[in-house]
Image: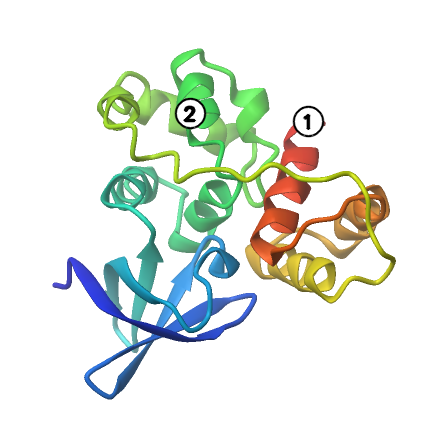
Amino acid sequence: MYEYIMGKITMVSPLYIVCENNGIGYQIFTANPFSFPEGEERRVYVYQAVRENDITLYGFRTAAEKQLFLKLISVSGIGPKSALAILASDDHQGLITAINADDDGYLVKYPGIGKKTAKQIVLDLKGKLDDLVGQNQVLPGQQSLSLENKAEDPKLAEAMEALQALGYRATEIKKIQKKMADFKAEETSAYLRQALKIINQK
């Protein structure tokens, strides 16, 4: 089992990144691929999921983020894709607070999470995530956004593709895109964080 891979990020897509180490490019699915700048040398914490006909790597920016992912997939009804969609918002402290406060209404905002699964998350994880908050590592750092923008920004388009990859419906993405039209950011990852913030404000 891998703990992390240290290498160069050679490709970033809405679904995954490619991290090259010793001439091997590892395809790694992440919550926000655009938070891994292409061309940089990075340590990517990984979880290897082995199924009958598939071996998949999931990547994280910190060890604590990986631990939060593992806690989430331990819940009945939460698979890796749903866990990544939850982690993508970067509001990990808000997530933990909602779980501890029995706020299943907060949890159902994530794609694929219904009332039953939200209640199961609270039941299984309430009071079991506080150590991650204490590490101050589970919040990977959020960038502030300027509220001006050009129409049809390619980075905004990439962020919308990333939302689709996370499982959000096309109709929902279209509404978010309209609300994002007046926002400006230099990085795709910042657009994606803002879009998820808008979703979580509903």
What element does badge 2 sit on? helix
Horizontal arrangement in the rendering, residue 115 relative to residue 177 (left or right): left
Residue linked to disc 2: 93
> Residue at position x 28%, y 16% from top?
127
Quadrant the C terminus occupies: top right
> Residue at position x 51%, y 47% from top?
85
Q: Position of residue 51 (x, y in %)?
A: 26, 68
Whole-Å distance between the Cαs marked 1 and 2? 15 Å
- The kind of residue tagged 2 is Gln
Local packing at callout 1 (Cα closer than 10 Å; few below 14, some 14-19, many 20+) is: few
Q: Position of residue 4 (x, y in %)?
A: 19, 60
Q: Position of residue 87 (x, y in %)?
A: 45, 42
Question: Which mark identifies residue 169?
Answer: none
Which colour style is shown? rainbow
Task: Give the mark, 1 or 2, whose residue is nearer the N terminus.
Answer: 2
* Quarter-of-image position of residue 68: top left
Q: Position of residue 107 (x, y in %)?
A: 53, 29
Question: Which mark identifies residue 201?
Answer: 1
Quadrant the N terminus occupies: bottom left
* Quarter-of-image position of residue 40: bottom left
